[in-house]
Amino acid sequence: MTETTLKQVPVKIEYGGKWISTKIGVNEEKILFPEPISAEIKIKTIDDLEEKKNIITISTKKGESYKIASIPKVLQILKKTIIMGCSAYRLMAYFMSPAIRGGVMVSNASWEKGAIAVLKTGIWFVSKNKQICIPLDEVTGIELTKREVQGKDNDVVQIVNIENEEVVTSFVLCPLTTLQILFNYLKDATKGTEVSAGDVDDVSAQVAMLVYSGMDSHAIEKMVNISHKEIEKIYDKLIKQGLVEVVMTRREVKLTTKGVRFVNEAVKT
């Protein structure tokens, strides 16, 4: 493929702490960045792709990283090109993602023919008109299960993840031998998020389940019959194990002398 076949697309690239408006060349083999970056990135050397809103981050085996912003149509071209040609575990398959959101079937969910690619930080689904990423650190479960497809039960890989505080389920369908290989690869890729039940004591496990159910700290203290100090110690353990994260710090206060005076005067009136 020659340089004349490079498709020129408008983008903004982060460089030197600033966003630069320019055009980059892209084809199935490479991405060409003009001055002042002046770099040529072979698609097959890319080993990771991340996306946040209208910004994608490309990482290479050499440790290079490039942030690119553009309109959705341009990003769609870039993502599909990268996913189908980068360094990743990849196979052709049918997928349904998302299939279930918050325990409810997604109304327009359907099987799409395309590919699944597993990169450093995410599982990517790509079809003719769609690219979906499930970050590996948001995956809560992977299993082999059955799913009815065209009236028959078929073996599928089920991927469950958390997205915007909702539980989302996706399915992958392909020949059984390939499916088993995919399942094993995904289990290995996400083993960093696994925690053995033996690593968490019974009370901490109970607290974690109550947090999952939506209870706040005050309600958990009453339910488990533990003090504020005890639940703080449990939270510290769960934080160290990567099972919870802090979203709000509850403060305990006491009145100052000035405060006591105010309250005493308020009571008199």
Image (cartoon, rainbow, N blue to C red):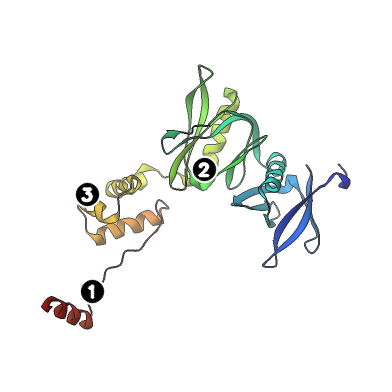
Label 3 or label 1, whichever lies nearer to me, is 1
Provide residue 34's location: percent of width, then percent of height: 81, 58
Q: Tell me if 56 is positioned left or right of 191 in this view.
A: right
The structure residue drawn at horizontal position 35% and vertical position 59%, both measured from the top left corner, is 236
**As drawn, which residue projects farthest toward the left?**
268
**Looking at the image, is mark 1 or mark 2 nearer the viewer?**
1
Q: Check disc 1 and report its element: helix, strand or loop.
A: loop
* Residue type highlighted by circle 3: Met
Q: CA distance from mark 3 to mark 2?
A: 33 Å
- Say the numbered circle drawn on residue 254: 1
Real-space Cα separation, disc 3 to disc 1, in angstroms: 26 Å
C-alpha separation, residue under disc 1 versus residue under disc 2: 46 Å
Which residue lies under the disc numbered 2?
190
Relative horizontal placement of residue 188, taking residue 76 as reference (left or right): left
Q: Residue at x 52, y 43 (%)?
A: 190
Position in image of residue 223 (x %, y %): 22, 49
**Label 3: few (<14), some or many (≥20) within 10 Å?**
few
Label ID, residue 223: 3
Q: Is residue 168 above or below residue 23?
A: above
Residues under numbered marks 3 and 1 in contact, where contact means CB atoms less than 8 Å apart: no
Please, what is the three-letter code of the amino acid marked with disc 2? Answer: Thr
Q: Nearer the viewer, mark 3 or mark 2?
A: 3
